[in-house]
């Protein structure tokens, strides 16, 4: 209470002071409850998408484009959320996507359950700071419990990697192809991961998504795959010498402010002759360098390559691939072991890459793609060519494979697995509940509520799989009480079974990250007691 309010009793009657004090207390409570309700509404929106039997959401944007997905991060990113507290859950999902790559729906559902627990505690008159501190303590206790459940993992164990991948893909639209996709992702990660540094840069795995064929045609290209087709008639080149050029193979243009005025045909012929000679000199310089495959970087100033240049290059049997994106240049240079050439005078033998075979492969859609195989001095990179019959399935396959690769990145970073299927959350509910009884008092009561909130994951998994959630969660409690800490919900067999035996495993980092981020978000929402609108300056 401020000094001004403290002086009020001398002037104002007691009744009025009571009213003022009551209103001051009511506003923060109202704001807090409003924030909790808004955030819970977002959590409830994605709750039905949790787990292998979760429902998909159809997202339609302003332009009429439709996305079908059950990826929590994608749903929340595309959702039009206006309430500032609800937006915090969108950011939470994004943070989980960056940190772990998987568990984006779970983290939002757990956060919603923790907010519901906080709401009940607030209604009992417990101070928000007390709840916040108790939840932080509960998160620390939760890490100790998860540590006891971890299964050590070795990076050379490809089978364990595939199991973790399959668990991530089991809840996706492409779950019927999870075995094939898991193998591709595991092979890709084993090729590019750095086991000594515990790091994996996903930029070293290039994903090329093309409509045409089926998901079974998805393949790992041991080399480079570009989402571009060759120009002209030369479509295949053996024993290729590849050059990546950053200059334009087209006549120079005048500046925006300048113009050239031509009065008669002879001047026009002279200009065309000069343009032809300029292009021919560039093509001769390329031929002299020994390059027979040309990658031309996209240009915004003028045409990257003119039709005349393509004509000359095809006559000399030089394969041309244009419109290489500026962002792809570092990846291409790392993969092929070449250097970008900025000018026709800068061609050197070191700048060229030697490749056994460069060929354009037919996809069946509007455009083809180009494959580079048998690269000499190849870098530690890999390309993944995803195929699907339509745009929606292709986009979902792309997102699902990204999630699977992120799961493997978690395993490279922190080499430990835990059981999936709600086993971790059920064990947390049991162990934190026992710890709450030991602590006692207000902290113990808050810890008990936190523990109960964890059961939302097995409850929702059972609900989405058309099982009786009360029966399933009761059975889970019984199994965990008996010491089966890896017991979880088996949606395939419609019951409770040992997740370790069923090979339903997930990285430990996904669970620890989920607990940390969900608890931090709840604490942030509890600490807010007012929303202040700033007047914009005219």
Image (cartoon, rainbow, N blue to C red):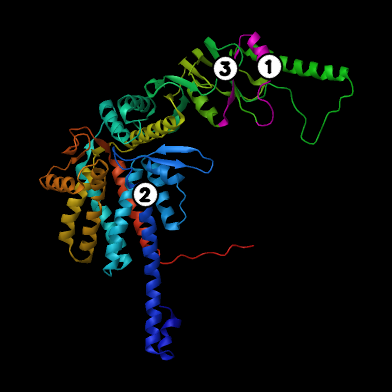
Q: Could you tell me which quadrant the N terminus lies in?
A: bottom left
Q: How far from the left and from the top, in percent, is residue 29?
A: 36, 68
Report the magenta residues as a range: 300-326
Residue 265, compared with residue 521, is above or below; it is above
Residue 375 seen in the figure: no
Cα separation, mark 2 vs mark 1, equals 56 Å
Q: Residue at x 47, y 38 (%)?
A: 66
Q: Could you tell me which quadrant the C terminus lies in?
A: bottom right
Which residue has dot 2 on it?
Answer: 45
| Number of the front mark, 2 or 1 | 2
Q: Residue at x 22, y 34 (%)?
A: 492
Between 52 and 337, which is closer to the camera in this rendering?
52
Residue sitting farthest toward the left: 482
Q: How far from the left and from the top, in percent, is residue 328?
A: 53, 29
Q: Residue at x 24, y 61 (%)?
A: 446
Which residue has dot 3 on it?
Answer: 230
Residue 255 seen in the figure: yes
Cα separation, mark 1 vs mark 3, equals 14 Å
| Number of the front mark, 3 or 2 | 2
Which residue has dot 1 on it?
Answer: 309
Element marked by disc 1: helix
Query: Would you say 122 lies left or right of 435 here?
Result: right
């Amino acid at each position: 209470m401020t000094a001004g309010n403290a002086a009020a009793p001398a002037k104002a009657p007691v009744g009025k002071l009571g009213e003022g004090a009551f209103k001051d207390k009511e506003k923060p409570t109202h704001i807090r409850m409003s924030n909790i309700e808004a955030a819970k509404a977002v959590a409830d929106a994605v709750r039905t998408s949790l787990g292998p039997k979760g429902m998909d959401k159809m997202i339609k944007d302003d332009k009429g484009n439709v996305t079908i997905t059950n990826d929590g991060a994608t749903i929340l990113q595309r959702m039009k959320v206006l309430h500032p507290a609800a937006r915090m859950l969108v950011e939470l999902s994004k943070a989980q996507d960056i940190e772990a790559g998987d568990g984006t729906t779970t983290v939002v559902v757990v956060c919603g359950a923790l907010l519901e627990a906080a709401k009940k505690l607030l209604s009992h008159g417990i101070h928000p700071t007390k709840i916040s501190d108790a939840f932080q303590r509960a998160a620390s206790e939760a890490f100790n419990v998860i540590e006891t459940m971890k299964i050590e993992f070795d990076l050379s164990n490809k089978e364990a990697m595939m199991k973790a991948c399959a668990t991530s893909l089991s809840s996706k639209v492409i779950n019927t192809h999870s075995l094939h996709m898991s193998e591709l992702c595991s092979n890709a990660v084993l090729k590019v991961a750095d086991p000594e540094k515990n790091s994996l840069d996903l930029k070293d795995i290039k994903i090329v998504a093309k409509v045409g064929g089926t998901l079974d045609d998805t393949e790992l290209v041991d080399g480079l795959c570009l989402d571009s087709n060759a120009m002209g008639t030369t479509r295949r080149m053996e024993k290729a010498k590849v050059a990546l050029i950053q200059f334009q193979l087209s006549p120079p243009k005048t500046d925006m402010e300048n113009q050239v005025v031509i009065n008669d045909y002879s001047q026009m012929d002279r200009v065309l002759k000069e343009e032809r000679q300029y292009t021919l000199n560039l093509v001769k310089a390329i031929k002299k360098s020994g390059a027979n495959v040309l990658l031309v970087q996209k240009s915004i100033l003028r045409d990257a390559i003119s039709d005349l240049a393509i004509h000359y290059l095809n006559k000399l049997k030089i394969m041309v691939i244009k419109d290489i994106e500026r962002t792809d240049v570092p990846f291409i240079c790392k993969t092929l072991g070449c250097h970008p050439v900025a000018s026709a005078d800068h061609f050197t033998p070191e700048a060229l890459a030697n490749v056994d075979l460069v060929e354009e492969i037919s996809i069946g859609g509007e455009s083809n793609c180009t494959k580079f195989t048998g690269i000499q001095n190849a870098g530690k990179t890999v390309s993944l060519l995803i195929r699907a019959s339509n745009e929606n399935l292709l986009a979902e396959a792309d997102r699902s494979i990204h999630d699977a690769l992120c799961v493997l990145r978690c395993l490279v970073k922190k080499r430990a697995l835990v059981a999936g299927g709600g086993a971790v959350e059920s064990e947390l509910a049991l162990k934190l509940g026992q710890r709450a009884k030991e602590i006692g008092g207000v902290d113990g009561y808050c810890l008990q509520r936190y523990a109960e909130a964890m059961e939302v994951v097995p409850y929702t998994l059972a609900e989405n799989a058309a099982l009786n959630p009360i029966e399933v969660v009761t059975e889970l409690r019984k199994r965990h009480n008996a010491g089966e800490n890896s017991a979880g919900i088996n949606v395939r067999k419609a019951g409770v079974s040992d997740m370790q035996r069923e090979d339903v495993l997930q990285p430990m980092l996904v669970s620890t990250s989920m607990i940390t981020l969900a608890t931090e978000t709840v604490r942030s929402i509890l600490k807010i007691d007012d929303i202040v609108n700033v007047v914009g300056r005219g």
